[in-house]
Image (spheres, rainbow, N blue to C red):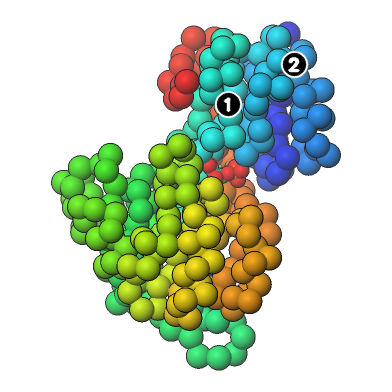
Amino acid sequence: MKKVLVATDKPFAKTASDQIRNLITGAGFECQFLEKYPDQQALIQAMPEVEAVIIRSDIIDKAVLDNAPKLKIVVRAGAGYDNVDLTAATAHNVVVMNTPGQNSNAVAELAFGMMVYQIRNHFNGSSGTELMGKKIGIHAYGNVGKHVARIAKGFGMEVYAFDPFVSKEAIEKDGIVAVSTVEELYSTCQFVSLHIPANDKTKKSINFDLLSKMPVGAMLINTARKEVICEEGLQKILAERKDFSYVSDVAPDCKQALEPFADKCFFSPKKMGAQTAEANINAGVAAAQQIIAFFNHNDVTFKVN
Ligand code: 3PG
């Protein structure tokens, strides 16, 4: 019997896990869960008999793959797959997939939760400000960016977007201003919400030069990846501009150095963007279905390697 491992250091909601287990066992496969594991060694040790694995931000690197001789497919229940070594997976003949769009609304909602928390001064009793009438720039108009745009309109914000991979027409048909350069986005918008993936081109790309273009009262909202931020530039802008704030779903590596700017920052203690029951069900069930379709019909839709 084929064995499917659900390896989630940050577990899915029980309703999602139950549905995933039912789907996998209902298709005639064995389903094993490895949750909140103590270290990477625990994941490595769980691999030898496994033919498929569902993960979240769990690390699938060469060491994991070397210990998984039966593994055929890894499905990242989520969007970003920077936690999977695609080159090593391909070398091991392992198919890697993601489940794009399934957790996007949850991530977009968190962006607004953090924005409101920050502009209301961490709910400390002092007068804050409002989102209505302000300009928000969406950096990358993908699945999350589209939900951010929809919610921003509900707040009465003016919505701008930049995405070199999406046509101006496609953005503007959603009633959003498409700007031509990343610099234009940052110099136009008081709020910028990041939705770019972490890859060789984007890592450290959000730097001091870009951030210093932002208007007075600037706020950078990061529900993407900490790696896309140039942390030296972030420290510098926070030191130079008292009006600048940064909210992020997970702390930067330089968190301690940012302590003097605590009132200008918020970092979720655990990555929380996709951590809703709805997103867990959407992404987890999609992952299970993709594994079943792969084994039963050789379906490689959503393959990323
Ligand atoms: C994603 O890339 O889908 C999100 O960052 C969610 O990550 P998580 O599943 O680890 O919460």
Residue bearing the label numbered 1: 85
Give the left or right position of residue 137, taking residue 60 as reference: left
Q: Residue furthest bottom?
A: 126
Residues at circles 2 and 1 in contact by the CB criterion of under 8 Å: no
Q: Residue at x 65, y 63 (%)?
A: 255
Q: Report x, y in % for residue 104.
A: 46, 47
Query: Callout 1: helix, strand or loop?
Result: loop
In this rendering, position of residue 182 left or right of residue 247: left
Give the residue type that dot 1 points to. Asp
Q: Is residue 116 visible?
A: no
Regarding mark 2 in the picture, which secondary structure is present there?
A: loop
CA gap, disc 2 to disc 1?
14 Å
On the image, the x and y values in percent for residue 197 come to 45, 42
Residue 192, how many percent across, how many down? 38, 63
Dot 2: few (<14), some (14–19), or many (≥20) neighbours within 10 Å? some
Q: Mark 2 is on which residue type?
A: Asn
Q: Quadrant of ligand 1?
A: top right
Mark 1: few/some/many CA within 10 Å (<14, 14-19, 20+): some
Q: Earlier in the sequence, mark 2 or mark 1?
A: 2
Vertical arrangement, residue 3 with respect to residue 119, above or below: above
Q: Quadrant of residue 15?
A: top right
Locate residue 33: give its quadrant.
Answer: top right
For image coordinates 40% across by 78% down, the residue present is 217
**Residue on which the image places disc 2:** 67
In the rendered image, residue 273, in percent from the top left (x then y), is placed at 56, 53
Q: Residue at x 28, y 66 (%)?
A: 187
